[in-house]
Amino acid sequence: MYERGVADAERGELHPFYYQHYYHYRRGYDQARRRMRRAAWSAQGYGRWVALAAAALAIALIVAMSSAWRANREEDRTILAMPATDTAATESARPTRTPLFPTATLVATPEPVVLTLRVGGVAQVSNTEGRALRGRAAPGLKAPVRVAFAEGERVRILEGPVVADQYVWWRVEGRNGAGWAAQQSLDGAVWLVPVE
């Protein structure tokens, strides 16, 4: 009966009565079908890929578990190395176990502080290529020059902003006096850089 079950499995014809009533027929039929399925899988190459994927998954799990185990062992060593002062304090100071798959935590990044020119603030004269920044009697290019501010000098902003002759003007005070100075050139070089 076993050989008949094998032969029927190879032909793809199942005899329901024999399958239901004869153990050896059923055993031969089932073993032959399994063998044929395995042969089909290995002929297509799936068996190798499944085995490789299973091995890679097992290795990844082993590595992850061993690194988590090592981290927990390090935490245990630090706990043991700590001097025992108070039992309640020691119990509350114990670190929690590291999860096998760590979750992402949101970390709040501080907002960058944007400095702007403002009345009462401080600016530094910059980007003048060694020349002095001119302080005029009034905002505009036709107003007479009253004072010169050296590059790198810190000035206090007294008034402004005023737009004249395509420039933004601020009244600033430095070591040598006060005057209206342009904030930046027409091509974008900033002459008054906010400091505070």
Image (spheres, rainbow, N blue to C red):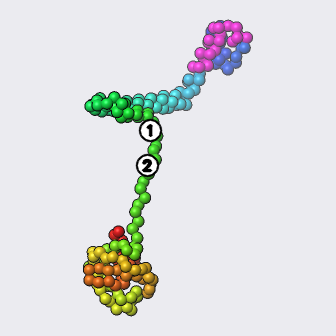
Residue underneath mark 2: 107
Q: Earlier in the sequence, mark 2 or mark 1?
A: 1
Q: Is residue 106 left or right of residue 10?
A: left
**Residue at image coords 39%, 88%:** 138
* Screen quadrant of the N terminus: top right
Q: Which percent across, then down, holds residue 94?
A: 36, 33
What type is the residue that disc 1 sits on?
Answer: Pro
Vertical order, 18 against 135 (above or below): above
Give neighbour class at mark 1: few <14, some 14-19, many 20+ (Cα, 10 Å).
few
Q: Is residue 149 left or right of residue 171?
A: left
Residue 72 visible to an observer of this rendering? no
**Residue at image coords 40%, 74%:** 118
Vertical order, 69 against 111 (above or below): above
Give neighbour class at mark 2: few <14, some 14-19, many 20+ (Cα, 10 Å).
few
Vertical order, 18 against 190 (above or below): above
Q: Are marks 2 and 1 in contact (CB under 8 Å)?
A: no
Closest to the observer, 171 or 66:
171
Q: CA distance from mark 2 to mark 1?
A: 15 Å
| Magenta residue check for 2 | no
Q: Which residues are magenta?
A: 17-35
Residue underneath mark 1: 102
**Residue 160, which numbered label?**
none
Residue 164, by quadrant, is bottom left
**Residue at image coords 61%, 19%:** 33
Residue 157, by quadrant, is bottom left
Q: Main secondary structure of the magenta part?
A: helix
Q: Secondary structure at mark 1?
A: loop
What type is the residue that disc 2 sits on?
Answer: Val
Q: Secondary structure at mark 2?
A: loop
